[in-house]
Amino acid sequence: MTSSKMKKLAGGFAFILLVLIVAAVLRVNDQIGQRYSHEENVQKFGRLSYYDSRLNEFVSPQSIIFAKNKTTGGDPGFLRFFMKSPYAPQNELPKISLSKSDFSKPPMDLALYWFGHSTALMELDGYRILIDPVLDNAGPLPGITKRFSAAPVEREDLPSIDVLLITHDHYDHLEANTIKHFAATDTRFVVPLGVGARLKGWGVLPNRITELAWHQSFNFKSVKITATPGVHYSGRSNKDKNKTLWASYVISGKKSNLFWSGDTGYSEHFKQIGDKYGPFDIAFVEIDAWNNGWPNTHLFPEQVVQVVSDVNARSLFPIHLATFDLALHPWKESIELVSNLAEKSNMNIITPVMGQKIIPGVTKTGKWWVSQR
C-alpha cells in the first residue's frame, strides 16, 4: 500500500472517530439535560433553609459521607459501571411481561406494579401514577450501568399515565427517553425543585410540570402528593451536584395513605414524617446500594425495618433492588437480609416479581429470589 493510500485510510478513520466522539458528546449532553442558572436558582429557592445561595446547592439534612478506604466489595470507581458486574445474577430474573391490555381498565382504587429497581406504576382512586420510570440502562450512554435483565414492559406498552412522579435526577431514577415519550401526552409531571429544567429541555411543556419543595403538596383530583425530606444528593454530571432537590413522597388517596422513601440514608426525618403524615398502609422503602464507603447515602437492611416502624406503616414494599449493581455486593443479599429481618419483626412484606400486579391484602407474594443465582 502506498503512503498516499495509507494517509487517506488514516484520514478516513480519523474522520469516523471524530464523528463518533461528537455524537457521543451530543448524546451525553442531551442525557444530562438542562438546569436553571445560578441566578434563577437563587431567585426561586434562596429563601429555603436547605438551599445554599453561595454554593448554589441544595443541602442534605445530614452531610453525605464518602470514605473510599471503608468501601467493601471492590473498587467504587466509575469504571465499574462499564463492565459486567461479578455480583449480577447468572440467569434472567423472573418477570411477568406486560402490554397495554394487561393493565386495569379502568385503573383500580389501589393496585401496584413493580418494574424493577425503583420503577413502579401505582393505581390509586382510579388514576395512574408512574414513579421513577427507568426501563433501559442507568447511564448517559448505552452500556453504562446495564440492567441485569430486561424490564417487564416497554415504554410504548405503558398505559396512559395521569401523574409521572420523580424522586431525584440520578440516572437510575430519571430517564430522558421515557420523559420524552410522555412529553407529547397529557401526563402531569411532579418533581423536586429544579428538576423541571431537565424536563423542559426534553420537551415537556412548563404548564404540565409541578416542582415541589419539601412539605409542599400537589393535588390531582382525589390524590394528594406531598414531597418530604431525604438524606441524599443529586446530579447527572460532575458539574451539577446538588443543583436540584431530591425527595421522598407521601401519596394519599380517599382510603389509602402510602409512603415512598426515594433514595435516602437513615435519619430522624423518618420519625418526623410518620408523626406528621402517618400512619401509612404501605411504605415503599429502598433496600439496596448500601455500603460502608457511603454509610448515609442509602439504607442498610436493619435500617429498612426501622424506617417502617418510624413512619408507622402496616406493610413494607421493598424497592431499589435486583436491577442494577450500584453497591458492590451480591444482587440478592439485600432482599434476603431485609426479608429475614421483617419476618423476625412480624412485619408484613410485599415482594412481587417484576411485572406482577399486586392488590394489597389480596395478592400473595413469595421469596422469588431464593431459587435464583
Image (cartoon, rainbow, N blue to C red):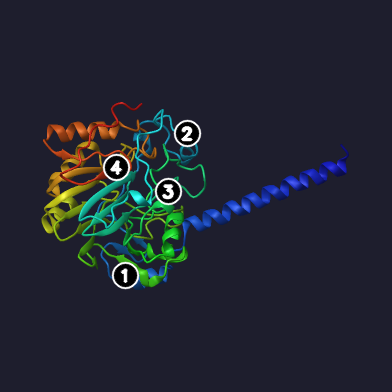
Q: Spatial distance from mark 4 to mark 3, Cα to Cα?
A: 15 Å
Q: Earlier in the sequence, mark 4 or mark 3?
A: 3
Q: CA distance from mark 1 to mark 3?
A: 40 Å
- Tell me: 142 left or right of 165: right
| Labels 2, 3: front one | 3
Q: Position of residue 196 (x, y in %)?
A: 38, 65
Give the residue pinned by disc 4.
356
Q: Are marks 2 and 1 in contact (CB under 8 Å)?
A: no
First along the sequence among labels 1 and 3: 1
Badge 2 or badge 1: first in the primary sequence: 1
Pointer 3: what residue? Answer: 154
> Circle 4 — which element?
loop
Q: Which residue has dot 2 on it?
A: 84
The residue under label 3 is which amino acid type?
Answer: Glu
Q: Nearer the viewer, residue 50 or 235?
A: 235
In which image quadrant can residue 109 be found? Answer: bottom left
